[in-house]
Image (spheres, coloured by chain):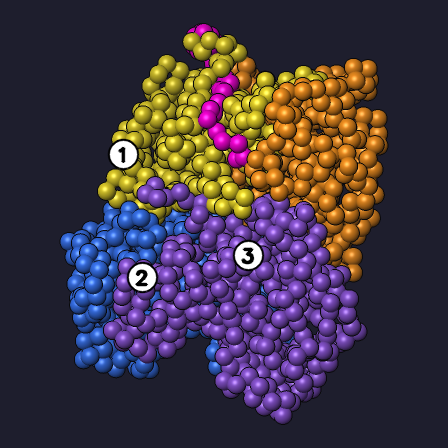
Chain colours: A yellow, B orange, C blue, D purple
Amino acid sequence: MNSFGRIFRVNVFGESHGESVGVNIDGIPAGIPLKQEDFLYDLGRRKAGAKGTTPRKEDDLPFLKSGVFNDHTTGAPITILFENNNTRSADYAKLREFPRPGHADFVATQKFGGFEDYRGGGHFSGRLTLNLVAAGVIAKKILGDKIQVNATLKEVGGFADAEEGLAAAIAAKDSVGGIVECTVDGLPIGLGEPFFDSVESNIAHAAFAIPAIKGIEFGAGFAAAKMKGLEHNDPIIDASGKTATNHAGGVVGGITNGNQLVFRVAVKPTSSTPKDQQTLNIASGEVETFSVKGRHDLCIALRVPVVLEAITAMVLADFMMLEARIPRVNK
Amino acid sequence: MNSFGRIFRVNVFGESHGESVGVNIDGIPAGIPLKQEDFLYDLGRRKAGAKGTTPRKEDDLPFLKSGVFNDHTTGAPITILFENNNTRSADYAKLREFPRPGHADFVATQKFGGFEDYRGGGHFSGRLTLNLVAAGVIAKKILGDKIQVNATLKEVGGFADAEEGLAAAIAAKDSVGGIVECTVDGLPIGLGEPFFDSVESNIAHAAFAIPAIKGIEFGAGFAAAKMKGLEHNDPIIDASGKTATNHAGGVVGGITNGNQLVFRVAVKPTSSTPKDQQTLNIASGEVETFSVKGRHDLCIALRVPVVLEAITAMVLADFMMLEARIPRVNK
Amino acid sequence: MNSFGRIFRVNVFGESHGESVGVNIDGIPAGIPLKQEDFLYDLGRRKAGAKGTTPRKEDDLPFLKSGVFNDHTTGAPITILFENNNTRSADYAKLREFPRPGHADFVATQKFGGFEDYRGGGHFSGRLTLNLVAAGVIAKKILGDKIQVNATLKEVGGFADAEEGLAAAIAAKDSVGGIVECTVDGLPIGLGEPFFDSVESNIAHAAFAIPAIKGIEFGAGFAAAKMKGLEHNDPIIDASGKTATNHAGGVVGGITNGNQLVFRVAVKPTSSTPKDQQTLNIASGEVETFSVKGRHDLCIALRVPVVLEAITAMVLADFMMLEARIPRVNK
Amino acid sequence: MNSFGRIFRVNVFGESHGESVGVNIDGIPAGIPLKQEDFLYDLGRRKAGAKGTTPRKEDDLPFLKSGVFNDHTTGAPITILFENNNTRSADYAKLREFPRPGHADFVATQKFGGFEDYRGGGHFSGRLTLNLVAAGVIAKKILGDKIQVNATLKEVGGFADAEEGLAAAIAAKDSVGGIVECTVDGLPIGLGEPFFDSVESNIAHAAFAIPAIKGIEFGAGFAAAKMKGLEHNDPIIDASGKTATNHAGGVVGGITNGNQLVFRVAVKPTSSTPKDQQTLNIASGEVETFSVKGRHDLCIALRVPVVLEAITAMVLADFMMLEARIPRVNK
């Protein structure tokens, strides 16, 4: 469904070419300073416009519709609305005929019986990640300054240098994927909840809500499958829990162990490649040549880091509030 | 927390060396034939005893404590209990002194203030995957015969041939990791729920509850990050949604597209390696040489396939019941 | 928290004198005809303006911000926003000094540390029942025409005749309470979910979210406590489950039994009485005479029926979708 | 469904004449002293055997199957099992023919297609309240000594004196209902969560899970509907929030206000009256004379107080842990 989190509870809504997209966030403590300006930096990082991103530019101004009073959170649910001003729905009329490969067009029609808002991907659009970024801004405030969440591009189109990968994509006139790594420093020991709400479980859950993510790994990740036990184990070297290596990526038994949290996600190439594609024409029932029009990112991975930070902050803020709930008997 | 699922709702409990482990499952329709024998095949597949697995053998008999009457489900919650008969807790007394690298010992003590049942990993133990397997048996019944969930070992210790990988581990006297792949055939189009309950989100969530899983990827997964759009896109070739390739792994926009669902998980090497390790002695505050006693698997990945099938079936059964709830207007 | 329901999931937000109030509804099937006009009749029934209700009149126009396309639901979450145009916040400045008896002013300040939006009751205001009425309109569409939800005033200020009760209140220059009864005809047998989601549990849960409700009873209700078993029992008289009497109010074992669902709620007198009151002056620490200004209903019970219908329809729609999820083996 | 609560999360299971009834409780902090003996006092208060209660006596010994180690909670889910030793299922065979008026027999068969465990009411049986009492014992420990929950019989069969009411029932050879009042002293201000999780909402939700409850009212309750505003309002008389009267029953705006929490429930007469009844014979399709055999309480209200205390403690413990989660910025 469209909500996530237990205490820090996020509900997203909206469609790419509908009237608006937005997010409703419940469970936020009262008294946190919050105003429109606080969102602009991270929203700007997500924004299109750089080389390799879509020419569609929205103002992306977050309107605070509820839950904020005198520039502070009130403890009531916060609703943030983004208007859709810059839509060109005519681009999408053709999609009813040619469900775009890699997109949700076909499954959405099957699932929602043709009633879905198909324009620009509708509710499946990457535009809804605006909501995640906005929620992430609030989550980062709950984490505070000591906890630093930082996501960066590690690879674009197979190149460690993003510029190089992008240049290759532009040269090939095709879209490319990438890898984004997220690290978190300053975490306390003990976040995460057995059995089903491990740190990995909840971060992976939220990460796979980001369109185009197809894999996630923590610490050594898939490389761990080729390692031996002695090599992979991280020896604890002091009473604070610091480990000599960090193959676990900061999570043991699903619980933060006080070391840096590290994970990576695989981002598939943008499905809307500029290249001609072969796919089914629903009307004719034949496979035909099809070309995606509209404005699209060559490499969606470029816009993923701030979104990945956002969902990570959301999950961690939720865990921190869950943990705080329990006045441990021995504390 | 210890529950998972929206309609097919699983609650796990128990400790490795406590009195029992068990699972409570709510939301199961009435009238499904169910008796103890139905569980034995999958429980047997999970069982220790093969080369590379722990010598600890429990009977692993599932006792149906509620929710079943006249060998059918009643619609009331089903509780299944497994007794712990074959425990050697003395093995674990030393753990209080040496928190085992790679295990939850250290974080558990920090999180639960020393009150956790530390014997054999307690509530963090892989023994709790018995509960998942049991829940999976019921989930598979809900999926029915047309939907086939099948998980297999793809790699052990870096070798595609599991026997070879295991032999290398035995020779090296060290534990090894592995890769397990799960496929599902026969799925209808349309399972999965935007925005946060994508098929990938929910499967990843449940998969990371399995101890030792450190990565997951769907379809082409991490390889997709190096592909170009035209190469990665799966052209739709007929009105049933069949695609020419399956780089998406059967999930587009988070929704099943009617093709084979495919994903892989990375399993880290068993943390309880037979080798000597360096780690902190809590009492002395010094890093010392430590050797794990007790009975352990050399390669925990060997026991993962049936568990991975189980969580996959759980997630899919939940999605099927969620989907069925909605009498679409146009149907 | 601010959400309710399992499948038909409602999230309310907003403040009385903030920018807006609104509601986000998840879980609605695609393909239900829905446009702004559909809401006006029920919103009009809730509206102020009749004798005994507040002179504050908002346009109460529902703006559909998401989830609707071509005048049909899309299957994506529906967001409905109401603007607050007609606020007089100056009326409420004094409340910081005199927490109004019967209102949430005092507890809100304690709970939210003074950061709450105190204007007009803020998030505690009866204005948020707009959201419930809007959600109820959609819920009624899911119930369909065969299921009729109907709430009526049974008593105002102790008089069975509402006009009479209101006249007495106006004469006394004091506010009054009332009793509202809700009936539902046409329900199928079998709605409600053991153990914790009985029909009574979920309706009571939602009903007590309506400000001013202080009691609820089903069927014979409190009178049942004085009855004998033979008198109270409703004999089943045919295979459809029809009973000779209906002391159970249509619910047995927490499950609908196919007879008319009947329940009543007690509405306290509007706390904002026109009369002078004695209460604490926070600044002086003394009990002083206080008089509520602002515009208020003499009898809030007059506006409760349509709200009670709404929450009833919400709960029943949720149960119907929960029930539909289960393809009973024997059906 | 069979779970309740957000942090203090209770899952009940079992059937009256099945193998066992039990409860799984998640979210309990580690380090709370807990052993079998701690449950016996409250379980004893619920026990049958006094005048007016059923002659069926079970040992009602709670077996702690998980979550407790060295006589303390571990932070893992706690499972408590009660065995059913003293069942006489033969008594119930006839029920398939005559669905008992007032019982869930008829609706259960309709809902679960005849697969329900019908013996002794199965999953609908009052025997499941054992689970609530057990959960309540743990909840009371979380509340601590300063918060006192106390429920008492206020009325039996219309008599304020329970003995008198019971004597009248015995004389009439019929079952009777009653009224139970619950008070809580020592509560902090601020428990309860807008908009849907008011104190009244959550207590009512849980209370209506207790079989035979047909009404609930807080403070003045239904009497408030006949009062005027000035009379009903509780003037605040000091900075601690103390009020001169307590018509609100300690809850304003759905939030505890620091005064005594007071509410009452209406308990219907036991449906299994010793008197002959007229009801449908399913087989013949005719209304016939029917007489309930088996062992039953004449007045189930006698056993309600400890159960009502339990659900109240559960709800309040949940609220306290929800409240504690939030490190208010201004604290």
Q: Please give the residue where the numbered disc 1 appears in the rendered image.
A: A36
Q: Which chain carries label 3?
A: D
Q: Please give the residue where the numbered disc 3 appears in the rendered image.
A: D141
Q: Which residue is drawn at 37% across and 65% down?
A: D259
Q: Nearer the viewer, residue B162 or C306?
A: B162
Q: Residue at x 78, y 45 (%)?
A: B84
Q: Residue at x 48, y 22 (%)?
A: A183
Q: Nearer the viewer, residue D317 or B213?
A: D317
Specify whether disc 1 shares its chain with disc 3: no
Where residue C197 sits in the image (x, y, percent)? 55, 60
Residue D241 numbered mark, or none = 2
**SS of the residue at dot 3?**
helix
N-terminal of the pair, mark 2 or mark 3, is: 3
Q: What residue type is labelled 1?
A: Gln
Check residue A182 for magenta coloring: yes
Q: Is residue B89 visible?
A: yes
Q: Nearer the viewer, residue A126 or C330?
A: A126
Kindly check if marks 1 and 3 are in contact, taking CB atoms under 8 A apart as contact: no
